Amino acid sequence: MVKTIAALILGLSISFASIAAPAGKAPQWDELSPQQRAVLAPVASQWNNFPEFQKRKLLGVAKRFPQLTPIQQKRVQSRLREWSRLTPEERSEARRNFRSLKRLPPDQRKAVKQKWLHNRESGHLRRHPKQHPAPIPASGVRPTTTSPAR
């Protein structure tokens, strides 16, 4: 659920950040300009396998990137890194969730966004469960892999 919400927000961000997609076939990675490659670096290894619609949207992000504030630029880079870590299934789910969210009335959409932001700020959406450290045992002491100094 947490990954789904994070993916949904990421999809929203990428969709809202994009501008009208350029016509024609989207270029392969090595055909991008140095500026486009710099902006889209988080998805470099996957670029050539992306569907055309996704490449066009990301090209729109790269085109608009120089006009963004430094904070917005960092957010775009961060979200591109998050997006690049999702599996194709998770991306599909994020797109489905985004379409569902778009169908909601504006007040309900705002409520979903507020709830997500609250959960993110309060730490409920920190990381994927696999990235959390091992739980602390009942003794209160975390096991270590090194021997204690003598």
Image: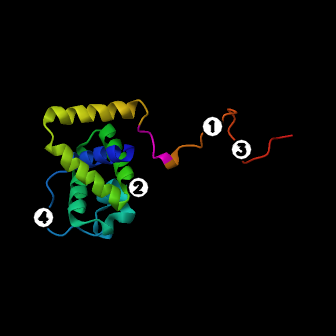
Counting from the top left corner in percent of width and height, residue 144 is at 71, 44
Q: Which circle, 2 or 3, is nearer the viewer?
A: 3
Mark 1 vs mark 4: in front: 1
Residue matched to label 1: 136
Residue 137 placement (x, y as % from top left): 65, 37
Quadrant position of residue 88:
bottom left
Circle 4 is placed at which residue position?
23
Q: Earlier in the sequence, mark 2 or mark 4?
A: 4
Residue 120 shows up from this direction: yes
Q: CA distance from mark 2 to mark 4?
A: 28 Å
Which of the two discs, 3 and 1, sits closer to the camera?
1
Q: Earlier in the sequence, mark 4 or mark 3?
A: 4
Mark 1 neighbour class, 10 Å CA radius: few under 14, some 14 to 19, many 20 or more: few
Structural distance between the alpha carbons of marks 4 and 3: 56 Å
Position of residue 150 in the picture relative to residue 66 (left or right):
right
Secondary structure type for disc 2:
helix
Q: Which mark is residue 85?
A: 2
- For the stretch drawn in magenta, the main secondary structure is loop
Please say whether residue 65 is visible from this viewpoint.
no
**Which is more N-terminal, label 1 or label 3?**
1
Relative image position of residue 7 (x, y in whole percent): 32, 48
- Density class for disc 4 (Cα within 10 Å; few <14, some 14-19, many ≥20) is few
Evaluate if marks 1 and 4 touch, with contact meaning CB atoms under 8 Å apart: no
What residue sits right under mark 3 in the picture?
144
Q: Which tag, 1 or 4, sits closer to the chain's start?
A: 4
Dot 2 amino acid type: Arg
Q: Nearer the viewer, mark 4 or mark 3?
A: 3
Q: Is label 4 in contact with label 3 (beta carbons under 8 Å)?
A: no
Ranked by sequence position, the earlier of labels 1 and 2 is: 2
